[in-house]
């Protein structure tokens, strides 16, 4: 009987990095940096980092802006890659560019972009987007009642175009609109909600 050597193991899939945008100054909240808003006794940035990790993202990268030294001092970001965006006042687009630029030096095959001010988005939504990427989707977004929302997953080949179109406070919005037919919508309304914290009445989301 002829024997054949076993097939070599399949290469491990490239990791999905978590990219947390946490640079906002909270101007409409009276200048309270969103990363340091308290949720269940700890800074909101820690909750988001934990959700990314529990959902399957590694590495986790945090982009800071407003009050970055204070965030570093008060929040436990151990194990995270931390990037400070000196242009944070120009809007979220600059933080997205800074984060993707830094991730380009890693072996990540995709970036799952999460916003720090959405406390009702947790590990379950993150895990569904990671699973969609493992299933072959290079571009995916959480959906709530079939409406596209956040988080968003961006395959590595897409990063240059995303960075070229990320301006002001629009983040990846223009890119996603231009490629709407390619976005896999992953329904998450049963495990998450897209509510964000922009004004004082929104602080009820932290209760």
Image (cartoon, rainbow, N blue to C red):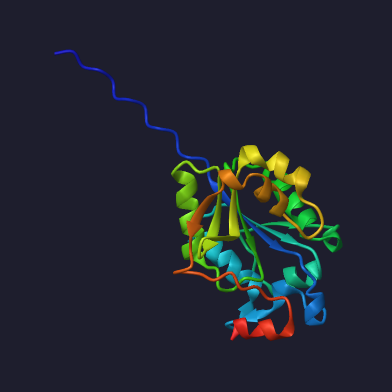
Classify 155 as above or below 87.
above
State the image quarter where residue 118 is shown. bottom right
Q: Residue at x 53, y 45 (%)?
A: 15
83 and 155: which is toward the camera: 155
Residue 110 position in % (x across, y down): 58, 45
| Picture residue at 54% right of the left edge, 71% below the top | 193
**Vertical side of 90 occupied by 154: above or below:** above
Q: Residue at x 76, y 65 (%)?
A: 23
Residue at screen point 49% across, 56% down: 186
From this view, report whether residue 110 is shown above or below residue 5.
Answer: below
Residue nearest the observer in this picture, 182 or 26: 182
Q: Quadrant of the N terminus?
A: top left
Quarter of the image holding residue 108? Answer: top right
> In the rendered view of the protein, which quadrant contains the C terminus?
bottom right
Q: Is residue 25 left or right of residue 156?
A: right
- Location of residue 138 in the rendering, given as x and y in whole percent from the top left corner: 55, 42
Q: Nearer the viewer, residue 183 or 31?
A: 183
């Amino acid at each position: 009987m002829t024997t054949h050597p076993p097939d070599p193991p399949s290469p491990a899939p490239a990791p999905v990095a978590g990219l947390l945008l946490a640079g906002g100054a909270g101007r409409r909240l009276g200048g309270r940096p969103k990363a340091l808003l308290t949720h269940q006794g700890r800074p909101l940035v820690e909750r988001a980092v934990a959700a990314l990790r529990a959902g399957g993202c590694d590495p986790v990268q945090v982009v800071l802006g407003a009050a970055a030294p204070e965030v570093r001092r008060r929040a436990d970001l151990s194990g995270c890659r931390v990037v400070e965006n000196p242009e944070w006042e120009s809007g979220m687009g600059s933080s997205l560019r800074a984060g993707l630029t830094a991730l380009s030096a890693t072996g990540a095959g995709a970036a799952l972009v999460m916003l720090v001010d959405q406390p009702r988005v947790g590990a379950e939504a993150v895990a569904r987007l990671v699973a969609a990427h493992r299933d072959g989707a290079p571009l995916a977004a959480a959906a709530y009642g079939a409406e596209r929302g956040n988080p968003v997953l961006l395959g590595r080949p897409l990063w240059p175009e995303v960075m070229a179109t990320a301006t002001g406070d629009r983040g990846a919005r223009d890119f996603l609109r231009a490629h709407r037919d390619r976005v896999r919508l992953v329904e998450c309304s049963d495990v998450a909600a897209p509510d964000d914290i922009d004004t004082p009445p929104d602080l009820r989301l932290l209760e």
